[in-house]
Amino acid sequence: MFLELYTYAYRKGVIMKKLEDYIRTIPDFPEPGIMFRDITTVFQDADGLQLAIDSMQELIKDLDFDVIVGAESRGFIYGAALAYNLHKPLVLIRKKGKLPWKTISVDYDLEYGKATLEMHIDAIQPGQKCLVVDDLLATGGTAKAMAQLVEKLGGEVVDMLFMIELAGLNGRKFLEGYRVDSVLAFEGK
């Protein structure tokens, strides 16, 4: 895929950057020893955003699914772009108290605390195949909670798709039993 994008860029006279070139790394944030991967710099560059979405889409090009499920808030960005490109519905998973109608919820552990995610009770129909999308796979807590919400409504998680994976936090192992794809993987935290 990179070769195809590079060839396209070359024909247009554009110098092609790799996706990781668009990601800003901030040492010791939010605490010492953490290398924070800031993706706002991807969104701030039209070429970076397009490369990010195209790269995610390439990973799922042969995947059969009905619905894209995105987590608040950066999962909404990636999920909406993919849903638009692929002409698929987008289901939103939000933090507790943000959805206006009847919801189901799941409590889960974060790296730095606890949280609750919610989804409307009619967002997923039984048997629907769901692609779970988020920006980052760290410990896997958020992704697992998203999968639990989908499964509570009778949906099937066919893949979990991330822009970045922090391999040193072993989130992939926590999600054992699910297909997991990530565009970029960084060692460490």
Image (cartoon, grey):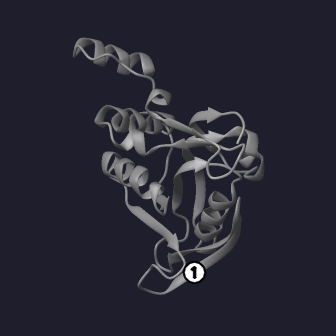
- The residue drawn where x is 55% and y is 65% is 127
Q: Quadrant of the N terminus?
A: top left
- The residue drawn where x is 72% and y is 48% is 171
Q: Nearer the viewer, residue 168 or 127?
A: 168
Q: Where residue 143 sits in the image (x, y, percent)?
A: 63, 58
Amino acid found under the numbered disc labelled 1: Ile
- The residue drawn where x is 60% and y is 64% is 146
User: In the figure, 89 relative to 58: above or below?
Assistant: below
Q: Where residue 6 sits in the image (x, y, percent)?
A: 36, 16
Judge whether residue 19 can be spotted in this image. yes
Q: Nearer the viewer, residue 23 or 125?
A: 23
Q: Where residue 9 sits in the image (x, y, percent)?
A: 29, 18
Secondary element at tag 1: strand
Q: Which residue is mark 1?
A: 104
User: In the figure, 4 relative to 45: above or below?
Assistant: above
Asked if residue 146 lies left or right of residue 5, the reply is right
User: In the figure, 123 relative to 111: above or below?
Assistant: below
Q: Nearer the viewer, residue 185 or 21?
A: 21
Q: Quadrant of the C terminus?
A: top right
Q: Where residue 126 sits in the image (x, y, percent)?
A: 55, 71
